[in-house]
Image (spheres, grey):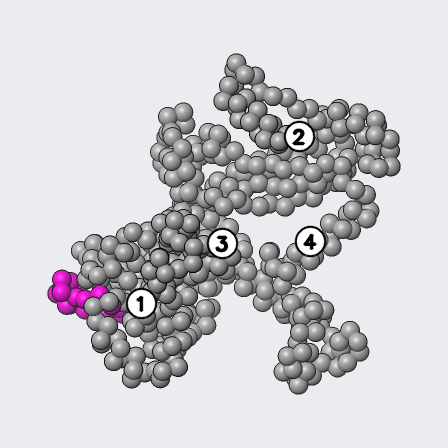
């Protein structure tokens, strides 16, 4: 049975589209009604009514949708809904030269040459985004089939995210089958959202760490909590005067120009410093780095360390042991390793974090001093498109010569003492030697 979850039944787009087994779905719902307090009041319609094979898709009852929309919306609203659906379903990536054939109804031959199908990836379809179905072919093949559409929140008033009681248990019944021990329950020892989600994700029971939706839910709750606390502190520390000595009034906050001035002076979003990735947070980190440069001078080394999780057997084996299985790392192919890493991203990132700590503690800052005596360091973590982490690092080394202040020979001798480079052995590593040689020739040309 194909099911589409929508915001409104009259929308052509959907939030979720999956094929479910009706018997298993009903068994699960009956079980939840027995053991889950938040699902005990859920009513179940007659099975024959929902399983009627003649149930039409939203595309087969366009007339009914049109009548419903004409009753509820005027012409301007309908045009706005149509524009929103087009933007959501077939977003035009103008900067990348991408387009979707069905967005404007034109045939390929009627389009400019730079927008012909041959110039676009995936046979003319836009690349995958958060609002597009992952499998475009499946979406097209099932476009006219009978699909049951559900819009449970239609006609309801929006409710605050944290005002819904037992929201966590209702949203994740697999993780909370009995609806107990959620974040908003009262405990003898009060837990912050950060401590609560750490205990969930680091637990030996990996059902929380395996669910990517739960990871994003946890991140959202933590960030909202940090923003609220930071906002409260800023309100207590806030001043009633602007930098130029004017008193802040309600009329000033209603003036667009005055609000823009506050934003430019960073007085309006200073509370967002605690949120990683926000402009205020980046400004704070940049100021800290510039302060280190003023105190310590120019960094000696800039290093990049990437994760090699595909060649770390202990990471793969640790994840499988958490799942109660044993694997032979040497017998796994690339796709199998990727599936294992995706099955528990929390463990994979924790292993990387521990390796970064060991890199600094046991190598760079050790008495061996492979890069000299490191006085201080600064690094940030980034993630590649496929989800693999790496760090960019600045190192300050004691006694290092300063470029353009010391003579060139002193600088070259210092670099040669710690940094060497050589081609791979063509006999023991022929493939790697060939690739490096090709890169070297390409850089020379």
Query: Considering the image in quadrants, where does the C terminus appear?
Result: top right
The Cα–Cα distance between marks 1 and 4, rounded to whole angstroms, is 44 Å
Rendered view: 272 above or below 360: below
Residue toward you, 332 or 114: 114
- How far across and down, in percent of the image, does residue 299 sit? 76, 40
Q: Quadrant of residue 389?
A: top right
**Badge 1: how crowded within 10 Å, few (<14), some, or many (20+)?**
some
* Comes first in the chain, label 4 or label 3: 3
* Residues under numbered marks 2 and 1 in contact, where contact means CB atoms less than 8 Å apart: no
Whether residue 180 sits left or right of residue 292 in the image: it is left
Q: Secondary structure at mark 2?
A: helix
* Comes first in the chain, label 2 or label 1: 1
* Comes first in the chain, label 3 or label 1: 1
Q: Is 207 within the magenta?
A: no
* Comes first in the chain, label 4 or label 2: 4
> In this view, which residue lies farthest toward the top?
427
- State whether the magenta stretch is mostly helix, strand or loop: loop
Q: Which mark is residue 285?
A: 4
Q: Which contiguous range is marked in magenta?
A: 41-58
Q: Which residue is mark 1?
A: 12
Q: Which mark is residue 96?
A: 3
Q: Which mark is residue 363?
A: 2
């Amino acid at each position: 049975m194909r099911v589409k979850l929508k915001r409104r039944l009259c929308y052509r787009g959907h939030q979720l589209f999956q094929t479910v087994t009706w018997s298993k779905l009903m068994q699960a719902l009956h079980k939840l009604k027995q053991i889950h307090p938040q699902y005990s009041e859920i009513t179940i319609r007659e099975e024959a009514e929902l399983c009627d094979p003649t149930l039409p898709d939203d595309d087969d009852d366009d007339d009914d949708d049109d009548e419903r929309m004409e009753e509820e919306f005027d012409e301007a609203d309908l045009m706005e809904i149509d524009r929103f659906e087009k933007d959501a379903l077939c977003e035009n990536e103008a900067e990348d030269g991408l387009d979707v054939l069905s967005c404007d109804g034109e045939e390929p031959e009627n389009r400019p040459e730079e927008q012909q199908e041959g110039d676009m990836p995936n046979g003319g379809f836009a690349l995958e985004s958060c609002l597009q179905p992952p499998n475009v072919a499946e979406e097209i093949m099932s476009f006219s089939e009978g699909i049951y559409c559900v819009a449970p929140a239609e006609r309801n008033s929006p409710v605050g995210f944290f005002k819904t009681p037992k929201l966590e248990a209702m949203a994740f019944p697999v993780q909370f089958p009995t609806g107990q021990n959620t974040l908003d329950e009262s405990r003898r020892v009060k837990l912050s959202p950060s401590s609560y989600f750490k205990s969930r994700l680091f637990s030996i029971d990996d059902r929380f760490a395996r669910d990517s939706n739960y990871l994003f839910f946890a991140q959202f709750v933590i960030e909202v909590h940090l923003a609220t606390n930071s906002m409260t502190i800023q309100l207590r520390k806030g001043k009633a005067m602007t930098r130029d000595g004017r008193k802040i009034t309600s009329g000033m906050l209603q003036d667009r120009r005055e609000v823009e001035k506050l934003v430019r002076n960073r007085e309006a979003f200073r509370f967002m410093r605690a949120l990683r990735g926000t402009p205020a947070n980046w400004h704070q980190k940049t100021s800290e780095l510039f302060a280190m440069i003023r105190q310590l001078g120019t960094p000696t080394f800039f290093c990049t360390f990437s994760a090699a999780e595909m060649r770390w057997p202990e990471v793969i084996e640790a994840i499988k042991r958490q799942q109660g299985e044993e694997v032979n790392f040497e017998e796994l192919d690339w796709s199998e390793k990727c599936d294992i890493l995706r099955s528990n991203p929390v463990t994979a990132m924790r292993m990387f974090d521990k390796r970064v700590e060991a890199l600094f503690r046991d190598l760079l800052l050790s008495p061996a001093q492979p890069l000299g005596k490191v006085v201080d360091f600064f690094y940030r973590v980034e993630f590649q498109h496929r989800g693999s982490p790496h760090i960019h690092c600045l190192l300050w080394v004691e006694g290092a010569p300063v470029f353009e202040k010391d003579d060139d020979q002193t600088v070259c001798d210092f670099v040669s003492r710690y940094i060497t480079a050589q081609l791979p052995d063509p006999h023991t590593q022929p493939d790697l030697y060939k690739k490096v040689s090709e890169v070297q020739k390409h850089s020379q040309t």
